Image: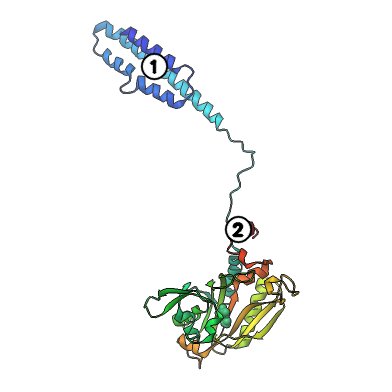
Amino acid sequence: MKNEIIKIKNEILEALNGIKDEQVLAGIEKKYLGRKGSLTKILRQVADLSGDNRKIIGKFANDTKREIGEKLNELKKALDNSQASDSFIDVTLPGKKIETGRLNPVSIVQNELEDLFKSMGFIILDGPELESDYYNFEALNIPATHPARDMQDTFYVDIKNKKGEYDTVMRTHTSPVQVRAMQKYGAPLRCVVPGRVFRSEAIDACHEHTFDQMEGLMIDENISIANLIAVMKELLKGIFGQEVETRVRPGYFPFVEPGIELDIKCTICGGKGCPACKHSGWLELLPAGMVHPSVLKFGGIDSKIYTGFAFGLGLTRLAMMKYGIDDIRLFNSGDLRFLEQF
Ligand code: PHE
């Protein structure tokens, strides 16, 4: 038996010679010293021996086991150390840059405007992008037969609204939220509604099928066009950080009376004329007006007591003016070379 032990010991020592891999080492340990390992088996047989034989062989076997155990531990430590030095970290190397996302320029101006309007006591609302014909047109004083429907090239959708009463459209403006807000909150009311709108446009540098607007609505007793102009001026100052040159023209929208168009001098060409302003030097930025009494009625508000103003700010256009972006198609292009500049 002693010979057998010596044979196994030599076998182990040979296997351990020049070992470099922790897993191989663990394999050897299991093969010889594991529960079913060959050295373990022999050690068990020592118990069956008798008398002096048992003492002598027993001691020899235990010494061998200890010796091999020590050798294994030594090797484990050596391997551990060499691995630690392999994974040495050079703390002086420059780090890997973590890419961060950015806000689309439209979101930037939207956030700024939300802060500005919140400071003037307005609440921020949103509404559905797939809107019923009723809120998008009818409740805004644009019945089915009204020629004003043609003012906005509409994506009609082949689905009825929830009650099955109205056709649905991709909302052509944020104005449908006017009546929704009146019905929900009543008067007095101050709200802005940022959001995406959709039109079946022929696309060019200043027209997109999907763009952003921000609707504004203020209803109270004694609201006049003077309040409207004051809020608009405040808004433009907040966005551009300075007074910009504006002009006010009459404008027609069936849901306001009177209606106005506030234009700003094109900040891209300084008024000389460029593709972004259709070579006119001016940009329509803020259509607005006093809320039409029948729209108040649709919203359940008594027009004898309350008046209000509404405006529909072109958020996308505003971002173009603010940052001097000369092509509206860039916003939804997903082009990182564009987006990374903000
Ligand atoms: N909803 C109109 C549009 O998109 C703009 C508008 C809003 C005009 C509010 C007047 C009042 O063309």
Vertical order, 306 against 113 (above or below): below
Above or below, comparing residue 235 to residue 342 in the picture: below
Q: Is residue 299 left or right of residue 309?
A: left
User: Tag 2 or tag 1, which sits nearer the N-term?
Assistant: 1
**Marks 1 and 2, Cα distance to the nearest angstrom?**
68 Å
Q: Name the spot of residue 294 as percent of width and height, x first.
A: 49, 90
**Mark 1 highlights which residue?**
66
Residue at position x 71%, y 70% in the image: 268
**Residue 121 seen by the camera:** no
**What label sits on residue 237 in the rendered view?**
none
Q: Which residue is mark 2?
A: 335
Q: Secondary structure at mark 2?
A: loop
Front-lying residue, 225 or 148: 148
Q: Is mark 2 within 8 Å of ligand 1?
A: no
Q: Nearer the viewer, mark 1 or mark 2?
A: 2
State the image coordinates of residue 24 (x, y, percent, origin top left).
Answer: 43, 24
**Label 2 crowd bin: few (<14), some (14–19), many (20+), radius 10 Å:** few
Picture coordinates of residue 14, whole percent (x, y): 43, 14
At 31% from the left and 7% from the top, the residue drawn is 56
In the picture, which quadrant includes the N terminus? top left
Q: Amino acid at mark 1?
A: Arg
Q: Amino acid at mark 2?
A: Asp
